Amino acid sequence: MNFEVAKEKALRYLVMAKKTEKEVRNKLQKVHCEEEIIDKVIEYLKDLKYIDDEEYVDAYIRQCMRLQNYSIFEIKNKLLQKGIKKYIIEEKISKLSQTGYENELINKLINGKLKDMEPLKQRQYLYRRGFKTIDIE
């Protein structure tokens, strides 16, 4: 497969939604594209700002906060699974940690979904979701 064909496949893959570098790389590997060509396509897409892992992390965190009610631990794990570099995740998550997001989310869950549960069950649920025990108390 040559560069132009690989580039077209990657662009079609990116049309629906933003993807991480790893996701695009995996997609091209599945269609048996050579590593050298994959590297060129990735660089081309980065130059055009079609792939930007830092921007992806920002958008993903906003989505998780607004729609998913994920703990910081869950967000971090999902991003690691998507192939985002750890230093990018740590930088963005540290900013999120300073906002008091988890405390607000814990209060929202306790006053909503978990309000009919006994306190021990609430703590167990929150612990399983990745909230720190300090925040739960």
Image: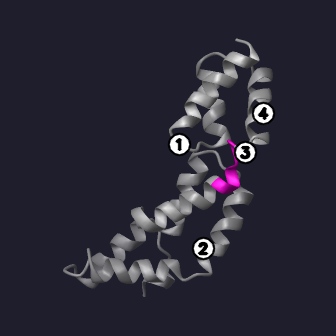
Give the CA separation, mark 2 to mark 1: 23 Å
User: Contact (CB < 8 A) between labels 3 and 2?
Assistant: no
| Disc assigned to residue 17 | 1
Give me the residue at 35% from left, 73% from top: 124
**Considering only order in the chain, which callout, 1 or 2, is on the residue closer to the N terminus?**
1
- Asked whether 45 or 29 is in front, the reply is 45
The residue indicated by pointer 2 is: 96
- Counting other residues with Cα less than 10 Å from the Cα at mark 1, is it few (<14), some (14-19), or many (20 or more)? few
Q: For residue 127, what is the image quadrant?
A: bottom left
The residue indicated by pointer 3 is: 49
**Considering only order in the chain, which callout, 1 or 4, is on the residue closer to the N terminus?**
1
Residue 69 in the image: above or below residue 105 = above
**Considering only order in the chain, which callout, 1 or 3, is on the residue closer to the N terminus?**
1
Give the CA separation, mark 3 to mark 2: 24 Å
- Asked whether 1 or 121 is in front, the reply is 1
Q: Give the quarter of the figure containing the C terminus.
A: bottom left
| Disc assigned to residue 106 | none
Q: Which element carries disc 2, helix, strand or loop?
A: helix
Q: Position of residue 36 (x, y in %)?
A: 80, 22
Q: Amino acid at mark 1?
A: Ala
Between label 3 and label 2, give the one nearer the viewer. Answer: 3
Q: Amino acid at mark 3?
A: Lys
Q: Amino acid at mark 4?
A: Tyr
Give the CA separation, mark 4 to mark 3: 9 Å
Q: Which element carries disc 4, helix, strand or loop?
A: helix
- Counting other residues with Cα less than 10 Å from the Cα at mark 3, is it few (<14), some (14-19), or many (20 or more)? few
**Considering only order in the chain, which callout, 2 or 4, is on the residue closer to the N terminus?**
4
Q: Which element carries disc 3, helix, strand or loop?
A: loop
The residue indicated by pointer 4 is: 44
Give the CA separation, mark 4 to mark 2: 31 Å
User: Contact (CB < 8 A) between labels 3 and 1?
Assistant: no
